[in-house]
Image (cartoon, rainbow, N blue to C red):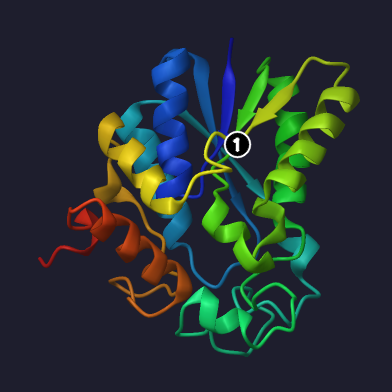
């Protein structure tokens, strides 16, 4: 059984990659890094470093043209707006039930659909991705929810003639629990990048930086990616 893992170079996808390698063996795991017009390349560079660490094949795919018209998502090059420097909970108070400004329109749907085509071509029978419940909370990122996962799972299974399925092993877990699992797996968190900014060091202020810091703190360990030189 071969697995394709969506790899963004962040905490969740890297933990997912470590889990897939434990389950199937590194010789049966392929990673896929996708660019989508984000404002920096740090996460792709992290995905490359993680794949090299594990000694697995890393495929790359550019979906940036799909998002070239978007000016609303603050993660994308087409937006002139700043990335919010506050927690997701505070951001959601201003959205009137809509996703946060860093939500990339239907990103996981596009990622999974594209990955399905590649997975079938590479004789994989399962796609792993690292969605978790904290991102889905409050409708911040609706394409990280269990309902979305189940719908995409059904569509991909039907559309592939039952040759392929998807798994989101952390979809009902909080980020702190994802980190706990990663610590058990000895995931190379020192190589990962989560910050929405592309600076030399994580900003510590954006929503994902705040969530990451809280997840490591909840496990009583320092984030290895944030250690001082």
Counting from the top left corner in percent of width and height, residue 222 is at: 17, 57
Write down the quadrant of residue 73 in the picture: bottom right
Are there few (<14), some (14-19), or many (20+) residues within 10 Å of tag 1? many
Helix, strand or loop at mark 1: loop
Residue 91 visible in this rendered orientation of the protein: yes
Q: Is 222 displayed left or right of 128 in the figure?
A: left
* Residue 10 visible to an observer of this rendering: no
- The residue depicted at 61 percent of the width and 73 percent of the height is 102
Percent x, y of residue 106: 77, 58
The quadrant in which the N terminus is found is top right
In the picture as drawn, the residue positioned furthest to the left comes out as: 229
Q: Is residue 71 above or below residue 62?
A: below
Is 54 in front, or is 89? 89
Give the residue displayed 44% in from the left and 77% down from the top: 206
Is residue 229 left or right of 173 when viewed as pictured? left
With 175 as the anchor, is 81 left or right in this view? right
Res. 165 image quadrant: top right
Disc 1 target residue: 168
**Residue at (68%, 14%) from the top-left corner?**
123
Q: Where's the C terminus, which quadrant?
A: bottom left
Task: Give whichever of 97, 191 is nearer the camera.
Answer: 97
Q: Measuring 32% from the left and 76% from the top, which residue is drawn there?
A: 204
Q: Position of residue 100 (x, y in %)?
A: 64, 75
Spot occupied by residue 58 in the image (x, y as percentages of width and height): 50, 34
In the figure, 110 relative to 29: above or below?
below
Count of marks overlaid on the render: 1
């Amino acid at each position: 059984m071969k697995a394709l893992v969506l790899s963004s170079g962040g905490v969740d996808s890297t933990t997912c990659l470590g889990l897939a390698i434990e389950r199937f063996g590194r010789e049966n795991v392929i990673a896929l890094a996708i660019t989508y017009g984000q404002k920096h390349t740090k996460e792709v560079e992290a995905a490359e470093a993680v794949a090299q660490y594990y000694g697995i094949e890393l495929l790359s795919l550019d979906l940036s043209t799909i998002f070239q018209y978007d000016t609303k998502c603050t993660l994308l090059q087409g937006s002139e707006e700043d990335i919010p420097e506050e927690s997701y909970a505070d951001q959601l108070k201003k959205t009137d039930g809509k996703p946060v400004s860093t939500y990339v329109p239907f990103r996981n749907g596009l990622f999974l659909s594209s990955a399905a085509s590649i997975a079938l071509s590479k004789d994989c029978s399962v796609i792993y991705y690292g969605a978790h419940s904290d991102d889905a909370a409050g409708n911040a990122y609706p394409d990280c929810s269990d309902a979305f996962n189940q719908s995409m799972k059904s569509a991909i299974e039907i559309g592939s003639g039952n040759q392929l399925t998807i798994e989101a092993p952390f979809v009902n877990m909080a980020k702190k629990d994802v980190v706990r699992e990663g610590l058990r797996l000895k995931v190379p968190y020192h190589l990962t990048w989560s910050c929405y900014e592309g600076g030399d060091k994580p900003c510590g202020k954006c929503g994902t930086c705040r969530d990451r810091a809280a997840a490591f703190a909840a496990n009583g360990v320092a984030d290895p990616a944030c250690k001082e030189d």
